């Protein structure tokens, strides 16, 4: 069941990248030169990703009732996949603090570091949502449980982001 859920989440992420990167001109694809995301896992040193049009890709969008912030890094042409992905989903479209308390909560975090996939089990995401063409900024902290590849392993993750909103 969990692996089916993980596959659906990965498919959803890929589709969201295709939708958000499809716009030409006018900043429709996200990945602006000022886009950044910093992630700290456990007690490791923070890693900062500076978005560009190819690798890493950072996207931010608001669709209907949800806000999505996505990172994709380390694309492998041979594997046709990304080495690292981080999907932040917020069940809301306004600035504020959004807690989540389980992997099935509509607000949450999904992190993949091939071959391992982690699902957020609790945490908080705080965001400030700008208009299309301006950044969505925020911070997050979470406990994530590995569901695929390293079953049962728990990690803590925190970070910040400033990503241009594409829609």
Image: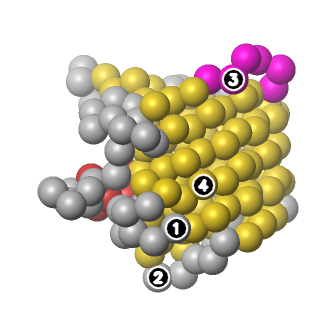
Determine which quarter of the picture holds residue 89.
Answer: bottom right
Q: Do the residues labelled 4 and 3 touch (CB within 8 Å)?
A: no
Q: Residue 9 at x, y = what percent?
A: 50, 54
Compute the Cα span from label 3 to label 1.
Answer: 25 Å
Q: Residue 112 at x, y = what percent?
A: 56, 36
**Which numbered disc, 3 or 2, marks the residue closer to the eye?**
3
Residue drawn at the location 44% of the way across and 61% of the way down: 134
Residue 130, numbered circle: 1
Residue in front for this viewpoint, 115 or 60: 60
Residue in front for this viewpoint, 142 or 61: 61
Q: Do the residues labelled 1 and 4 touch (CB within 8 Å)?
A: yes
**Which numbered disc, 2 or 1, marks the residue closer to the eye?**
1
Residue 64, numbered circle: 2
**Residue farthest to the top, as pictured:** 45
First in sequence: mark 2 or mark 1?
2
Compute the Cα span from label 3 to label 2.
Answer: 32 Å
Compute the Cα span from label 4 to label 3.
Answer: 17 Å
Label 1 crowd bin: few (<14), some (14–19), many (20+), radius 10 Å: some
**Which numbered disc, 4 or 2, marks the residue closer to the eye?**
4
Majority secondary structure in the magenta region: loop
Q: In the figure, 130 relative to 145: above or below?
A: below
First in sequence: mark 4 or mark 3?
3
State the scheme by which the image is colored: secondary structure
Q: Mark 4 points at which residue?
A: 137
Q: What stretch of residues is rendered in magenta?
A: 42-47
**Which numbered disc, 3 or 1, marks the residue closer to the eye?**
1
């Amino acid at each position: 069941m969990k692996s089916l859920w993980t596959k659906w989440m990965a498919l959803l992420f890929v589709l969201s990248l295709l939708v958000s990167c499809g716009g030409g001109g006018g900043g429709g694809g996200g990945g602006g030169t000022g886009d950044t995301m910093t992630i700290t896992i456990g007690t490791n040193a923070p890693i900062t990703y500076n978005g560009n049009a190819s690798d890493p890709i950072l996207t931010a969008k608001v669709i209907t009732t949800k806000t999505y912030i996505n990172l994709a890094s380390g694309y492998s042409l041979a594997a046709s996949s990304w080495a690292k992905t981080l999907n932040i989903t917020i069940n809301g479209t306004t600035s504020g603090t959004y807690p989540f308390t389980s992997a099935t909560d509509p607000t949450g975090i999904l992190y993949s570091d091939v071959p391992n996939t982690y699902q957020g089990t609790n945490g908080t995401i705080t965001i400030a949502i700008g208009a299309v063409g301006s950044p969505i900024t925020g911070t997050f902290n979470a406990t994530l449980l590995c569901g695929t590849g390293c079953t049962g392993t728990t990690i803590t993750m925190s970070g910040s982001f400033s990503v241009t909103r594409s829609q």
